[in-house]
């Protein structure tokens, strides 16, 4: 039976997986931009990422109150200031990281692809090895097996050989590896600009339209001019 009636459109979200690497502002920027672009989102927040979120924002992310906690998180600027952004989170569906029966754990669940932002080295290893230790890793493995776009915004420094090998496996499996490394040619003047540059490159890899950073125009000197 087709649950989509004639004239209705099927909700086809991007899965956003937030793992326990430093960089929760990157995830917030990606989520805001996806919602602003009219995309829907299935959100998976790993257990470990709740520690980084708590450390970086002071917010305790609770499955039972995810809407309140997500709204508070997305309204924050990268400098931690509350109420910096206005967000409408109606397009978000949240799945608990321990819920291995959730929609995104099956390839038959319709999604556009998955963005892991930020990606910890543990998450990189788990996806490269197909461990599926939680819903985030399972959804990423499913994304690869279904040949859908998978973007992995790894955040760690320095990288050891083991992680580098895992990243090569992910690249060979079809994922886009997008290191969370901001560039300085786009005229950043605030932390938010650097965060938005990384988030924008993640969305570029997924082919999602956004206006998060000023693109290179082939002109030396642009990096010393602040964004319009
Ligand atoms: C405050 C804090 C910051 C962390 N930063 C990083 C990081 O930048 N990169 C990384 O790979 N792991 C980092 N970790 C370690 C991961 O959270 C840890 O490896 C965890 O097992 C990742 O699990 P997950 O991939 O299931 O989220 C950090 C941990 C904490 C508590």
Image (cartoon, rainbow, N blue to C red):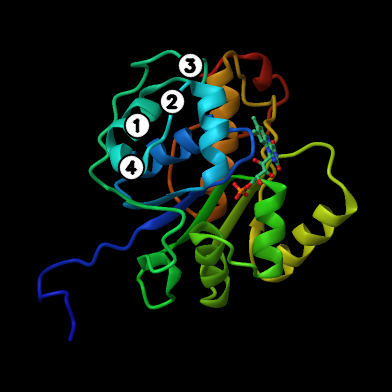
Whole-percent x, y for residue 165 in the image: 83, 60
In space, the residues marked 4 and 2 are separated at their CA atoms by 21 Å
| Mark with earlier residue (4, 2) | 4
| Mark with earlier residue (3, 2) | 2
Q: Nearer the viewer, mark 3 or mark 2?
A: 2
Q: Which type of secondary structure does the marked residue at label 1 adopt? A: helix
Residue 28 occupies quadrant? top left
Left or right of 120: which side holds 62? Answer: left
Q: Which type of secondary structure does the marked residue at label 3 adopt? A: loop
Q: Residues within 10 Å of mark 3 (few under 14, many from 20)?
A: some
In space, the residues marked 1 and 2 are separated at their CA atoms by 7 Å
Which residue in the structure is indicated by mark 1?
A: 69
| Residue in view at x 42 percent, y 74 percent | 106
In space, the residues marked 1 and 3 are separated at their CA atoms by 14 Å
Q: Residues within 10 Å of mark 1 (few under 14, many from 20)?
A: some
Q: Nearer the viewer, residue 12 or 120?
A: 120
Q: Quadrant of ligand 1?
A: top right
In space, the residues marked 1 and 4 are separated at their CA atoms by 17 Å
Q: Nearer the viewer, residue 23 or 66?
A: 66
Residue 179 occupies quadrant? top right
Q: Nearer the viewer, mark 4 or mark 2?
A: 2
Q: Are marks 1 and 2 in contact (CB under 8 Å)?
A: yes
Q: Is residue 7 above or below residue 119?
A: below
Q: Which type of secondary structure does the marked residue at label 2 adopt? A: loop
Q: Are marks 3 and 4 in contact (CB under 8 Å)?
A: no
Q: Nearer the viewer, mark 1 or mark 4?
A: 1
Which residue in the structure is indicated by mark 3?
A: 80
Which residue in the structure is indicated by mark 4?
A: 35
Q: Is residue 82 above or below residue 182?
A: above
Q: Nearer the viewer, residue 137 or 115?
A: 137
Q: Nearer the viewer, mark 3 or mark 4?
A: 3
Q: Which type of secondary structure does the marked residue at label 4 adopt? A: helix
């Amino acid at each position: 039976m087709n649950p989509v009636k004639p004239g209705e459109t099927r909700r086809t979200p991007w899965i956003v997986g937030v793992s326990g690497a430093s960089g929760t502002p990157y995830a917030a920027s990606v989520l805001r931009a996806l919602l602003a672009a009219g995309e829907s989102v299935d959100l998976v927040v790993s257990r470990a990422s709740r520690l980084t979120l708590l450390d970086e924002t002071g917010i305790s992310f609770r499955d039972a109150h995810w809407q309140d906690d997500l709204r508070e998180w997305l309204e924050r600027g990268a400098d931690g200031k509350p109420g910096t952004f206005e967000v409408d989170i109606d397009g978000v569906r949240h799945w608990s990281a321990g819920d291995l029966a959730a929609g995104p754990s099956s390839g038959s669940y319709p999604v556009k692809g998955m963005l892991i932002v930020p990606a910890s080295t543990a998450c990189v290893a788990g996806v490269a090895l197909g461990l599926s230790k939680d819903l985030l890793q399972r959804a990423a493995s499913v994304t690869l097996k279904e040949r859908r776009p998978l973007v992995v915004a790894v955040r760690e420094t320095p990288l050891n050989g083991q992680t580098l090998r895992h990243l090569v496996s992910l690249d060979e499996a079809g994922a886009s590896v997008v290191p969370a490394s901001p560039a300085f040619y786009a005229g950043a003047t605030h932390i938010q600009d650097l965060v938005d540059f990384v988030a924008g490159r993640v969305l570029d890899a997924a082919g999602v339209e956004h206006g998060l950073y000023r693109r290179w125009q082939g002109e030396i000197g642009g990096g010393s001019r602040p964004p319009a």
